[in-house]
Image (spheres, grey):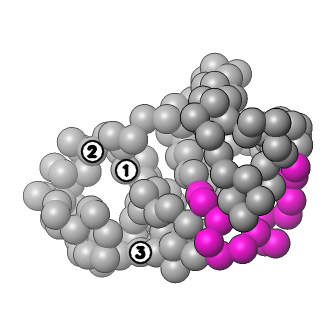
Amino acid sequence: MLVDFNDLPEHSRIWIYQSNRSFTDNEIQELEESLSNFLKEWTAHGSHLHAGFEIKYKRFIVIGLDQTNASASGCSIDASVHFVQSLEKKYNVELLDRMNVSFKQGEFIAYKPLKDFKKMAKDKSVSPNTIVFNNLVATKQEYQEHWEVPASESWHSRFV
């Protein structure tokens, strides 16, 4: 069951998929329609899941799930991964590769392989104050409070 992302409770589970490039406005419209259709039908053991989404910075797909009535099961998580894989193919983007880092460079969002980010930190091209996206947040509250943070406040701190 599709719900407005803003209406999801703070304890909702979150999955963040970062794209290796920005989506175009047309692609975002298509993505919103595809995500809406998927989440309307997303179930776990026959129960509709109360889920919503948002697309941030034309680059991040954020799916939230209120697990109060029904939790995601192995099969429902597999279904969501297959759905995201279909988006990767359709738009020729990377969404599931967790070995990449996104961070702000001014108003621009950079996307680099982790090894390149480490080298940039060593070369002082990024600092503890560089705003990074901590895609490991697990709840909507963590997402709202700890997703976009200085590298010193994230797992990225070990590199800067």
Q: Per the image, is 12 magenta?
A: yes
Tell me residue 62's x, y (percent).
64, 54
Which secondary structure type mostly characterizes the magenta part of the structure? loop
Q: Position of residue 133 (x, y in %)?
A: 44, 62
Q: Amino acid at mark 3?
A: Val
Residue hosting label 3: 149
Residue 121 is at least partly visible in this image: yes
Q: How many marks?
A: 3
Q: Secondary structure at mark 3?
A: strand
Residue at 41 percent across and 75 percent down: it is: 149
Residue 60 placement, left or right of 152 = right
- Which residue has dot 1 on it? 101
Three-letter amino acid code at the position of disc 2: Leu
Judge by depth and name the residue closer to the eye, 111 or 97: 97
Q: Residue at x 78, y 39 (%)?
A: 43
Residue at which label 2 appears: 114
Callout 3: few (<14), some (14-19), or many (20+) C-alpha neighbours within 10 Å? Answer: some
Q: Earlier in the sequence, mark 3 or mark 1?
A: 1
Contact between labelled residues 3 and 2, with CB atoms less than 8 Å apart: no
**Mark 1, secondary structure of its residue:** strand
Asked if marks 1 and 2 touch (Cβ < 8 Å), the reply is yes
Amino acid tagged 1: Val
